Image (cartoon, rainbow, N blue to C red):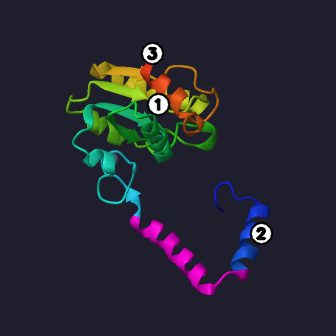
Amino acid sequence: MLPGVGPKSAQRIAFHLLAADPADVKRLAHALLEVKEKVRFCRVCGNVAAEEECRICRDTRRDTHVICVVEESKDVVAIEKTREFRGTYHVLGGAISPIDGIGPDDLRIRELMTRLADGRVTELILATDPNLEGEATATYLARLVKPMGIKVTRLASGLPVGGDLEYADEVTLGRAFEGRRLLDV
Ligand SMILES: [Zn+2]
């Protein structure tokens, strides 16, 4: 049920909990419930947030003319670690994947278009994962956004192909950001 926890690990955790102090187990259960209750999604960008808007959207020092589009909140964390980006984000909540039945309407694309409608955004950086679904999503968005006269860029190659953005190391991801290129569609 939890990512990265296989049957063996689950068994180890179960035995650990059986032997643990009931008070400790209660504290853990409370902590889990608190995460579920308090964490929500930013109404602007879709990133995880403790309040109506996430920490990045509330930060007035961020450049709101540049939006970096990512698939998941964990990608925001990965990019923030590079300290290469001072703009804002838009979290799609996944990528287009016909096999999994995920189409554009299942992602936060309408919300993105609303953000772009006032013409203040000058560059859209497409930082979806360097795999089939991520590329398809980037192409789809580029075709949608380009006619609006917004510069559309894609992270430079050099990221592990077929991989997940979050697994790229900080240096590689930072370089990919610096070397981003205009996307031709
Ligand atoms: Zn936000």
Vertical placement of residue 16 versus 47, above or below? below
Give the class, few, some or many, for how many residues have Cα within 10 Å of label 1's Cα (few <14, many ≥20). Answer: many
Q: Nearer the viewer, residue 16 or 111?
A: 16
Q: Quadrant of the C terminus?
A: top left
Circle nearer the N terminus (3, 2)? 2
Q: Nearer the viewer, residue 46 or 86?
A: 86
Q: Is there CB contact under 8 Å for labels 3 and 2?
A: no
Q: Which residue is mark 3?
A: 185
Vertical placement of residue 37 versus 84, above or below? below
Q: Amino acid at mark 1?
A: Ala
- Image point (49%, 23%), residue name: 175
Q: Secondary structure at mark 3?
A: loop
Q: Amino acid at mark 3?
A: Val
In percent of width and height, residue 50 lies at 35, 60
Mark 3–mark 2 distance (CA, rounded to whole Å): 50 Å
Please identify the residue farthest to the bottom as the structure is shown: 22
Q: Is there CB contact under 8 Å for labels 1 and 3?
A: no
- Image point (28%, 22%), residue name: 148
Please identify the residue farthest to the right as the structure is shown: 8
Segment tinted magenta in the rendering: 19-38
Residue 112 position by quadrant: top left
Assess whether residue 20 is covered by the magenta stretch.
yes
Would you say 168 lies left or right of 141 here? right
Q: Which residue is mark 1?
A: 127
Marks 2, 1: nearer the viewer: 2
Give the class, few, some or many, for how many residues have Cα within 10 Å of label 2's Cα (few <14, many ≥20). Answer: few
Circle nearer the N terminus (2, 1)? 2
* Numbered mark located on residue 11 in the image: 2
Vertical placement of residue 113 versus 144, above or below? below
Circle nearer the N terminus (1, 3)? 1
